[in-house]
Amino acid sequence: MKKSVNCKKQKKKYIKFFMKYVFVFILAFSAFFYGVNEAYATQVGTTESDESREESNMEDEYFGLNLQLDTSSDSGSMSGTIQMLLVLTVLSLAPSILIMMTSFTRIIIVLHFVRTALGTQSSPPNQVLIGLALFLTMFIMSPTLVQINENAVKPLSEGTITQEEALENGIEPIREFMFEQTREKDIKLFLDIAEIGTVETYDDIPTTVLIPAFIVSELRAAFIMGFLIYIPFIVIDMVVAATLMSMGMMMLPPTTISMPFKILLFILADGWSLVIGELVKTF
């Protein structure tokens, strides 16, 4: 018994000694590797920087790309820091601007109603619907974007106008678009909520009032179009359900039978061209 206990103790000592030896070896190896890496980096760092500069210059000459930020101190132009700040701000607010101040809201809701009325659940998928809505939004908003580019972006980049003037010139085409699609009833609603009295012209209406009024009007128009799209498909569901009831097939889901007829009707009526064409014409 004593011999076995002594053997166990010796084994534990050997194991501890071996673990310490391995740990010291790992530390020494890591220190050696770190020193070699630092020495190699200091020797090769300058050559790599020169090669990277030459490669970047060759790429710029080959592709014809030259990205610069004008940091001149003219009164009309912007400094590089302010330019980067504006770019980051626009990028962070881009989803909200796209969804809330363009035609994207109405388009994506109508397309969702079409898919739900057909009963196809996930066909077409969300990526396809969002992509189609984005391109339709760009198509509808292209005149507005051209005005913003000509009246605000180009003059600001050339330094002919100040930042405040660029902001006013850029928001004006968007306000015109939203005014054309917003009901006066919705504008009056938010004017009353903001406790703003009567306004004489559209210029007196704040943008903070116009944007929520525009969103409410877009939701109303989208739901009206969705209701009209639902009507023919509801008729098909009712006919199929009544037919199955008369045949005694009460356990068979009507939606399973009616979905092929819905798709056939949608194809025969050239549904996508009809829906998208009428949707774009509403703007």
Image (cartoon, helix red, strand yellow):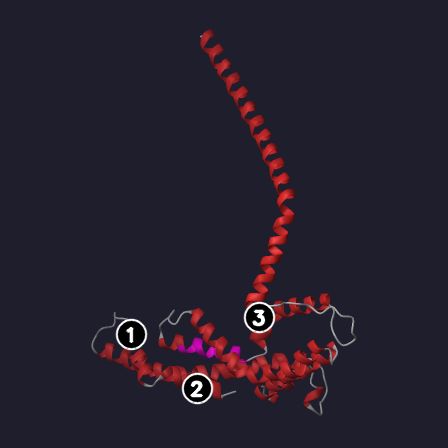
Frontmost residue, 129 versus 5: 129
- Residue 278 lies, in percent from the top left, at 44, 87
Frontmost residue, 172 versus 46: 46
- Residue 162 lies, in percent from the top left, at 75, 78
Q: Amino acid at mark 2?
A: Gly
Q: Reply yes or no: does residue 107 show up in magenta.
A: yes
What is the secondary structure assignment of the residue under circle 2? helix
* Eye-nearest disc, 2 or 1: 2
Tell me which residue sits at (55%, 82%) in the image.
Answer: 141
**Quarter of the image that includes the N terminus:** top left
Frontmost residue, 150 versus 5: 150
What is the secondary structure assignment of the residue under circle 1? helix
On the rendered structure, is 229 left or right of 251? right
Q: Which mark is residue 95?
A: 3
Q: Residue 21 falls in which quadrant of the image?
A: top right
- Find the distance from the CA under tag 2 to the CA under tag 1: 31 Å
SS majority, magenta? helix
Q: Which mark is residue 277?
A: 2
Q: Which residue is disc 1 drawn over?
A: 254
Label 2: how many residues lie within 10 Å, few (<14), some (14-19) or many (20+)? few
